[in-house]
Amino acid sequence: MNSTYNSASPPVETAISRPNALITWLMCVAGLVFAMVVVGGITRLTESGLSITEWKPITGALPPLNEASWLSEFEKYKQIPEYTQINGPAGMTLAEFKFIYFWEWIHRLLGRVIGLAFALPLAWFWVKKAIPAGYKPRLLALLALGALQGTIGWWMVSSGLSARTDVSHYRLAVHLLTALTILGGLVWTALDLHALAKDPLARPATMTGYAATVLSILFIQLLFGAWVAGLNAGYVANTWPLMNDRFYPEGVDTTQGVFFALVNDPYLTHFVHRWWAWVAVAALLLLARRVKKAGVRRASVAIHSTYGIQIILGVATVMTGVNIVLAVSHQAVGALVVASAVWGAHVMGRKTV
């Protein structure tokens, strides 16, 4: 009896330990992606994103190390419209340039760290045959999406280096939403592995139609949030719930059509982001209730807590004229809303397996 038990024990332990190791790794990478979203918000709000005018994935890892190098970088920055039209006339000093350069450099450095933190352990787990069956394609897809995100980041920055003084809000939205998609993919995969660690026969969760609808509603809110950020639309009104004492704001320019205004006009994008938020809240509230009924109270609490805090931060950001601490916190909690919503969607998907 004892010999049978002993011979059966090692495979069970191995099956459990491998998913757990991958869970720890993926959640660490998710934490880094969250930090990237926060630093990205700081970079945007300090107008630092165009301070590095070249894309050097390898050699650009080191910042300028002497005065001559700093002056060289500053000269490159002086050639772009943001400097010639805004910061140059404002009298930007080298010290001020170093400040904005720091945030963009940190943002790019984090991107490199995330790439290594994902690729190197993935290779190690692959060689050690520690990746459970069926998970290799998904992990490779996340790796590819991360590599694409680096390219998207430069594509975004390049839009502000020649003809305009800021980056395209369309490209900014793609960059932010890709980061949040990666975050969601990491969380979902870690949750699948968590189920596998508890039950070696567990199958991955499926995306239900209901959960997909909720996430789609949330996607629209995040999209308009990114456009509000890219268009500096948060500054067009500092009152709530009305916008400058009106429900529908004055100043919306529809001369090029309603759809053009919807995706380009700062007043209208702000208006939609402000009121679509309540549609997103209703969808998340209903998701949280279903998740609680499914027996996963912690996920329900996470959803309720994150959207509740996000509402408060959104209102406070508007009413303070986009205070940088509140605005960065709003972006950070937005990422946590995504993570908690993905958790809830995963709970619903486990019910169908």
Image: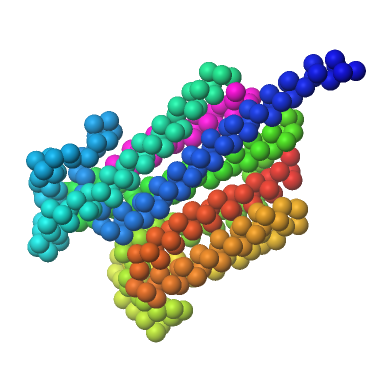
Residue drawn at point x = 84 percent, y = 20 percent: 5
Q: Is residue 6 left or right of residue 63?
A: right
Residue drawn at point x = 54 percent, y = 21 percent: 126
Question: x, y (%) of residue 70?
Answer: 13, 44
Residue 224: in sight, yes or no?
A: no
Q: What colouring style does the render use?
A: rainbow
Quarter of the N terminus within the rendering: top right
Quadrant of the rendered image containing residue 21: top right
Residue drawn at point x = 66 percent, y = 41 percent: 206
Q: Is residue 28 left or right of residue 157?
A: right
By secondary structure, the bulk of the magenta-drawn segment is best described as helix
Residue drawn at point x = 27 percent, y = 44 percent: 105
As drawn, 183 above or below 83: above
Depth check: give the residue in front, 148 or 333. Answer: 333
As drawn, 320 above or below 89: below
Question: x, y (%) of residue 230?
Answer: 33, 58
Is residue 150 magenta-colored? yes
Residue bounds of the magenta highlight: 130-155
